[in-house]
């Protein structure tokens, strides 16, 4: 059984702890659209409000994102999508994904640029469902390789991505390849 980690704000690091029981929560996944902008803003604010210790170094970046969300036109973005997890019309998780063409490999490469689940909804399989949904979307785009960057000290995320089939190729990067 793999270890379970949670952020300990007092120690300012991730610590190993007993795995909490899995929650059984009904969640609906779909791609975000222009009508979801207010929900996405509320979600981002909730993330920063409930776990400021995680966002302290990235607060400037997240404030910029909060200003940009109203300007995004999801219907015009062909290589960028946001997957949202909804419970009772409230976003409780999101995954941002994009792809680019890699000339070295002559193929499309997918990138997960952000995955977040609100703390009260963790351990309910929402993150895994978001990853599975994203893998299917990447497959529709013809993407065979998915990359992401995870912080070196984010032990919880590293364990999570390993469970989802990603392999650590180098420090701070995990890769998933369809069919391999």
Image (cartoon, grey):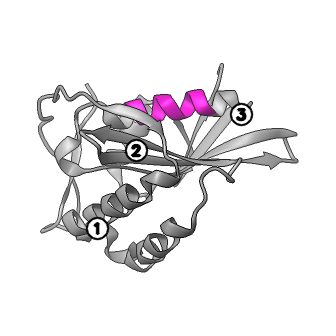
Residue 165 can be seen in this image:
no
How busy is the neighbourhood of tag 1: few (under 14 within 10 Å), some, or many (20 plus)?
some
The answer to whether any part of residue 41 appears in the image is: yes
Mark 3 secondary-structure assignment: loop
Look at the picture and state if 41 lies above or below 17: below
Which residue position holds label 2? 158
Marks 2 and 1, how far apart at CA:
21 Å
76 or 97: which is nearer to us?
Answer: 76
> Is 111 on the left or on the right of 19, as rendered?
right
* Residue 116: assigned label: none
Residue 10 x, y percent position in the rendering: 12, 68
Q: In which quadrant of the rendered view does residue 54 lie? A: bottom left
- State which quarter of the image contains the N terminus: top left
> Which residue corresponds to mark 1?
48
Circle count: 3
Q: Residues within 10 Å of mark 3 (few under 14, many from 20)?
A: some
Residues at badges 2 and 1 in contact (C-beta under 8 Å)? no
Q: Earlier in the sequence, mark 1 or mark 3?
A: 1
Tell me the residue at 37%/76% (across/down): 59
Q: Which residues are magenta?
A: 129-137
């Amino acid at each position: 059984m793999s270890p379970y980690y949670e952020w300990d704000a007092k120690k300012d690091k991730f610590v190993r702890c007993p795995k909490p029981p899995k929650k059984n929560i009904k969640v609906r996944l779909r791609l975000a659209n222009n009508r979801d902008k207010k929900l996405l803003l509320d979600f981002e604010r909730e993330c920063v409000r409930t776990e400021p210790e995680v966002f302290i170094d990235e607060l400037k970046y997240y404030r910029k994102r909060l200003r940009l969300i109203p300007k995004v036109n999801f219907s015009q973005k062909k290589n960028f999508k946001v997957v949202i997890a909804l419970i009772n019309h409230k976003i409780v998780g999101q995954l941002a994904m994009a792809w680019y063409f890699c000339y070295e490999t002559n193929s499309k490469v997918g990138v997960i640029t952000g995955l977040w689940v609100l703390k009260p909804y963790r351990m309910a399989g929402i993150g895994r469902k978001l990853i599975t949904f994203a893998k299917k979307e990447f497959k529709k785009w013809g993407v065979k390789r998915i990359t992401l960057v995870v912080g070196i000290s984010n032990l919880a995320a590293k364990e999570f991505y390993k469970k989802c089939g990603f392999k650590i190729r180098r420090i701070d990067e995990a890769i998933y390849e369809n069919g391999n």
